[in-house]
Image (cartoon, rainbow, N blue to C red):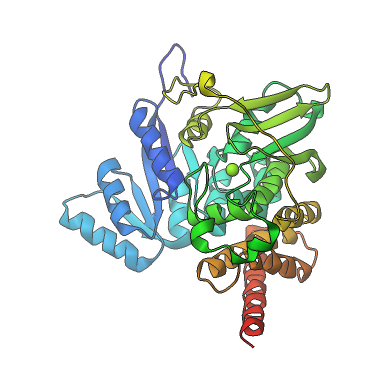
Amino acid sequence: MRKAGTEITLKRLAILGSTGSIGTSTLSIVEQFPERYGVATLAAGRNVDVAFEQAVRWRPRVVSLATEELASQLAARLKVAGVNGIEVVFGAAGTVACSTHPEVDFVVSAIVGVAGLEATHAAILAGKPIGLANKECMVAAGEILTAAACEHKVPILPIDSEHNAVHQCLRVGAHSEVKFIWLTASGGPFRRLPLEQFASITPEQALKHPTWVMGRRITIDSASMLNKGLEIIEACRLFDVSASQVRVTVHPQSTVHSLVEYVDGSILAQISVTDMRLPILYALAYPERPSSNLTFDLAALSHLDFEQPDFERFPCLRLAYEAAEKGGAHCIALNAADEVAVEAFLDRRILFTGIPRTIEAVLAATPEAHPDTIAGVLAADREARETARSVIAAAALRVHA
Ligand code: MG
């Protein structure tokens, strides 16, 4: 937002998921551009120590924590430290209070899972532009969110690196001229692992991602390529294209963040350093491009590899395409079942290969439906989680029988 002349208007942010990796990267952008960005509210989740540090450093109007107990712990610590004037709230209503606060100019939606869904929807209804790092919102409720954004003329700017790249590549052509969106995938740590060894993958091995440092669920999702599957659905919703127009290419260097192929045969790619601060800055500043120190050394780049994804090693990709085509409840179930399955894998209750098996069983048990309210989405999400838990419990019984 820029007034006449070169004066820069301060954008005050709501950061939903402030203690996670996107949240802390966003705060480092605010630190770097104090004339452009400020902090209005923080939804911090469960980490009271980091929430306390952030509250003291940024003095937001409101801080929200996951539970009432955590909120009273934070309030007590702020009081002892002599920090006044910060409202401490909690739960889903607390997150909504953060995203819709009247002083908020822009919402960074970075809470992992569907926990951020209500607050993101409420922010759109309140007319707040969204920087979306939470792909689960788009997967579970993409139709509802994009319809609301359209109605309220609210921009949704993707922070997910691939969709951010696509957003940039789409600025040069018309929607009708787009042939394919090519999402790049690093392929994860198991790109070359023989198929028969997938069952013995440990959580420690799966938590080591070759190029990006991220949260636990998204790291496991990258190893299973379910993350790319969620991104296929996210791309369909964000850019209003069909699943058959979204393709995946494995690009181990993670240098090209994604590409758009136009009908005339031109393919545009976005290249930059693998640092989430760049897509965050792009989303915050859009349509401007502030100068940054996030440079990429093109001369050091020796080669770029692209290969077809292996649907046999990574059945999650196939499951995601199936869900993308059915839409609605199937997309909700894909995401919910995966979250439950990843947790079970990290707890060593199921094997790595149990993740796609769980998802497949839950998708098969999901009736075709298209919830048109957030409450309906959340109900379908709960139902899919229940199904996933019973699928996992039944599988565990069989293993121990
Ligand atoms: Mg991504």
Residue at figure coordinates x 73%, y 61% from the top left: 329
Residue at figure coordinates x 58%, y 46% from the top left: 125
Quadrant in which residue 379 is drawn: bottom right
x, y (%) of residue 251? 64, 37
Residue at figure coordinates x 48%, y 52% from the top left: 215
Indicate whether 335 appears above or below 109.
Answer: below
Quadrant in which residue 244 is drawn: top right
Residue 115 or 155: which is nearer the viewer? 115
Residue 192 or 379: which is nearer the viewer? 192
x, y (%) of residue 4? 47, 13
Image quadrant for the C terminus? Answer: bottom right
Furthest residue in direction top, as rendered: 5
Residue at figure coordinates x 64%, y 54% from the top left: 193
Q: Is residue 237 left or right of residue 95?
A: right
x, y (%) of residue 134? 55, 48
Residue 181 or 289: which is nearer the viewer? 181
